Image (spheres, grey):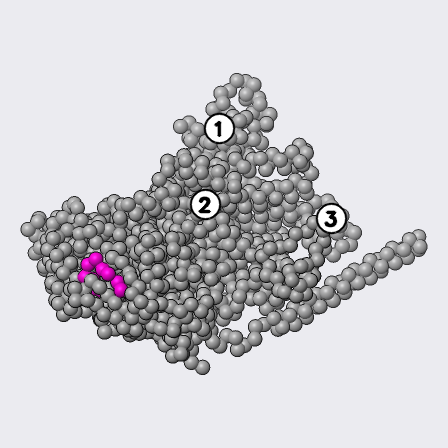
Amino acid sequence: MQEKTEIRKSMLSSIIPGLASLAKRGLAGWLVIIGIILIGAIIAITAASPWIRPHNPAEINVGQPLTAPNQQFPFGTNDLGQDVFSRALSGGGIMLQVSILSVVICLLIGVPLGLFSSYAGGIIDRIFCLIMDSIYAFPGLVLAIAIAAMLGRGVTNMAISIAVVYVPSYFRVVRSQVLSIKEMPYVEAANAIGAKTRTVLSRYILPNVVPSIVVIATVNFADAILTAAGLTFIGLGVPVEIPDWGWDLTNGRRLLTCGAWWVITFPGIMIILLALGFTLMGEGLSELLNPRLEQ
Amino acid sequence: MTLRSYVLSRILLTIPMIFILLTMVFVVIRILPGDPVLLHFEKQENPAAIEEMRQRLGLDKPLWVQYFDYVGGLFRGDLGKSMQDYSSVTQQILSAFPATLELAIFSMTIAVAIGVFLGVEASKRYNKPADHSIRIFGIVTYAIPVFFLGMVLQMSLGLGLHLLPVGLRFNPTLTPPTGLNIAIPKFPTLGLGLHVLPLGVRPNPPFARPAGPGLDIERISFSSGLYTIDSLLECNIHKFVETLRYLVLPSLTLGLVLSGVFIRLTRSNMFETMRLDFVTAARARGLRENKVTYGYALRNAFLPVLTMMGLQFAALLGGAILTETTFSWPGLGRYIVDRISFRDYTAIQGAVVMLGIFVSIVSLAVDLLYAYLDPRIRL
Amino acid sequence: MPNQLNHTAKVKKLRNAKAIGKMAIIGIVIIILVIAGIVGYYLTMPTGPALKDTLVMGTTDSVESCLDPARAYDYFGWEIIQSLSTGLVDYRPGATGSADDIVPALATSWSVSADGKVWTFNLRQNVKYEDGTEFNATHVKYTFDREMGIADEDGPFVGIGYSDIIQNVTAVDKYTVKFYLKIPFAAFLSLMACQASYIVDPAHAPMTSVVEYTAGNPRASHPMGLGPYTLKNWTRVAGKDSEIRLEANPNYWNASAGYPKTKNIIIRFYADSTGLALAITAQEVDIAFRQLGAADINNMKNNANLHVWEGTGAFIQYLVLQEKYAPFNVTTVRQAVGAAINRTTLVQTVFLGQAQKLYSMIPIGMFGHTDAFLGLGDPNYTRTRELLAPLGYNESNKLTFKLWYETSGHYPQSAQQAQVLKSSLEASGVISVSLDGLDWPAYRTARKNEEMEAYILGWYPDYIDPDDYIYPFVQSSGGSWLHDNYNSSTMDDLVAWARGNTTTSVRSDLYSQISNLMTNDAPLIPMYQGSAYAVTTPKVKGIYLDITQSWRHWLVYAEQ
């Protein structure tokens, strides 16, 4: 519990005052700002969608099927006559839930595992490394498909399958950081004084690991979104009543050949924007937190 | 440690890795809802027939027996029989593998070529507009869903401009290249089934020998499964060009999506390397800028790129699944998706094992290459 | 000092010269390669005329298991079997499913005994297998003995229940064969016309084993030989077909009439309907058949470079209601749901008019079809509310259930159908539907475990007769695979009479009664009947899309 508070504190302490000075940090700063704006905007739109959308996104035949974007339907309608604009506003829910949930699971499992394993060392470390390497070496999408197919449909299950694929990345990053910090003199000193393992971990090692975790988390978000879209493409998404960009992408694909470009394009753009937001943030943060290039 | 012990330890570690993978998948797919036995009976459900089918598929035995049977088969190189059409899984995978390999090689080549080139150019123009646009390009391409990009390319370059084919691996009206297939005359025959052979050499039985003098013929055939190589072996330039035509769109799709990582990596590495002393020295000696960049600095910055190629390989295979479906490319990715939707346990296990071995070999090779090139590792 | 400068200058010149020399050599090599490449390209280009007598067809199907009639039970397997062999009888192109549509194939005439249990076929003479053997009655006997003996669980012989129908097959003399049946079976000729009954070549069909795919050896991959084509090449990659090549069979018994019209057929396989649609639009194939999406077909109708062929379908889709537990264990609830389905919206919205509303399990165009379910309403929401009111269902207490659909493409556009169904059911005001989907294996298992309250299923006929649309659905044992727990002895009797009677008018009347009983009991609700579509380039002719759903490769040709 205390470790988690520490994590939160160090994250906040390194980011919030940083926000103000971000603009001064050149392109990297701007990347982070744009990323945050994109993500924030999409979250806001999705949250507000029940009130701002003109039509019920699941209602069929609100307009003639497959009408091109016009005044009444700014993004056109799809093959069932549903309003693409309303679906574009509301469809982010699943993606956001899946990616946030998978990142949370990864943080809760991958980070402690990495810390514990690398600090413990010895044979425990080797075993965990072996298991993590096996999962890591394997094409993520395949594993995600297999797990999602096994667990069944739904947001939680998609999140779990993505998380399983990503835990090794967190594990590796945390472990490599810990290994390098472990040998530092101040850690040795702390041990010499007789500090408990937990204290050493949370006070000294964890704050140094946080920047890398943040970067990996943003990459995780972006990838989770794209993997969720991929899973839906294969047919392992959520029940079709719930508006979802991934479903629109899959469905819209077969309509592209008859000229109905709008069905796939707008949800596609939304997915790209969301993934982009996280990637930009990650790109910017990684440069900010690793100031080598400042020279 | 020496190179030899490093290699040995890596190889030894690969084996338990594959086993962990295999066990994971073995368990996971058997918990999948959906019984492969039932899929053989669209309509009638005679319990006796269902039971016989279960036995035929080997699913009536307890789980641990199935597991050990499977592992035993692995050691003999037998990956089992597909639960759908009872044909050899090894054969199915071997037929699908070259297609994915070819796609992977070309995609990786495109990704690295675009990535490194753009990365270098970006590093030369730090913080200028060109640098920013290249970085943004790299980020954006990574954020595009692979099948979306594939569709866009299909519609524009394929359908719209009629330049390139929109699907499949080869022209439907031609026979795909089969590689080397030459007849070598071996030993002269002296009629009546007698032939001259060197001492100790036995004749090949299956040949029908014509009566009378003639020549014993032996066929040497070699087919790599990679159409580019096979068409060159056949000396058929037309088929070679056709192969490339069909390769362009899928590998461009996958390559573009992956290039972003290489852009980023090359850019940051080149930036550091260009400021090192030996580069300044080379410039001082009067070498042209291009030679300095590409000849000297890049060589040193390339090592991390190599490692990244190895790491990205797994991602490549994952992306190949969606690309193969979009372009009807008959590879391993499509195979896995099809087999999962049929709950074909043996086929899925076999594919996982093959993929795992493949990825391990690639990452092992990359690590070895790295260790060979960078003496610091071995110490 | 000057010497050193000179030396440096000389070294520089030499280096430059070397550099230029190197560049020159590389340049020359490149030019040579390019020229060789261009020359080689034109040399190795295939010569023109070879392609004229060839048609390329694209499809998303694939042979599911093998090309042996003993086991093959999938649509595409049967399509290829139909090109590689022939049956005793066949349906003429353009058939509507009546008995008049049966024409001679390997049998030139036939008769049936008065009790309907003995069928005699007189065989065509001078029909040769590829090794010169003449086709005769022993080959017919061999075929059926073999396939009923193997009784492969995957195969149609077990699935359709040949052993329940046929007692034995006797070769009376060289050109006469008799089938002794266990029960009088009115649809026997239809059964003989279906691809499961096609004749094999004993020289290539081992008595006790099924002939499976052998890579690189097309002859060893199938046991037949009397059809319009031979299998020139069959390549499977990763468990799916990648190419099939058919070549005209010189020994074909109907070759004198000019069949097959096209000497070579190449079939290529696409991963999904979008890929196929792109291919035919780009004219990379001459023919596209199965499966193209409704929107694509509509689009292609407006394309002057493509010709869209439309014909009767025999594929139907229906809603199954699980009678084992509430709410569908009550007949009036089932009727109420049946009355709330809006087939017009379904057919228009999901299939853009490329399907027909279906009010009977027997398809339109087949004798015995009546619009029985129209009596329930299409939709009739008043009826729905009236039926549900006595049970306590109204606007504030809605009938709630979950409707299941299939997600992996086993049926066309299941998810869209489910959404439209939900919308039309809820428009009644007293029904509330939630949706969920499973991929085919999970769906199939859930069906067996009777876990779904209401689910969508589809049906392709095995043989062209109303019996194949009734017996497997509402007869107690024949319909057990549906797992809807519907059992009615009245229905069983009606079905048995209809099966056994050989007079078409009597059967027609019986099927009408059956359909009416079905409407009252409402175990299943028929929804629509899909039409069949093929898209070709304008020069392709000879396509018949009739109720047999057969694709007759030998009739198709391209006019010059």
Please, what is the three-letter code of the amino acid marked with disc 1?
A: Phe
What chain letter is assigned to the residue under label 3?
B
- Quadrant of image for the C terminus of chain B: top right
Q: Distance between the residues labelled 2 and 3?
A: 60 Å
Front residue (pair A279, A295): A279
Spot the residue most to the bottom. Answer: C560
Q: Mark 1 points at which residue?
A: A116
Q: Which of marks 2 and 3 is in front?
A: 2
- The residue lying toward the viewer, choosing from B153 and C247, is C247
Rendered image: mark on residue B80 = 2
In the image, is residue A114 above or below residue B348? above
For marks 1 and 3, give the CA distance: 45 Å
The region drawn magenta spans C178-187
Q: Which amino acid does label 2 sit on?
A: Gly
Badges 2 and 3, same chain? yes
- Marks 3 and 1: in contact by CB < 8 Å? no
Tell me where residue B1 appears, x and y as whole percent: 66, 32
Q: Is residue C206 left or right of residue B206?
A: left
Give me the residue at 59% from left, 37% from top: B11
Q: Position of residue C412 (x, y in %)?
A: 31, 60
Q: Where does residue B98 sit, x and y in percent of width and height?
A: 54, 54
Report helix, strand or loop for mark 3: helix
Residue type at mark 3 is: Thr
Q: Residue at x 60, y 34 (%)?
A: B9
Residue C353, image quadrant: bottom left
How dense is the environment of label 1, judged by Cα within 10 Å: few (below 14), some, or many (20 and up)? Answer: many
- Residue C166 in the magenta stretch? The answer is no
Query: Which dot, 1 or 2, sits closer to the camera?
Result: 2
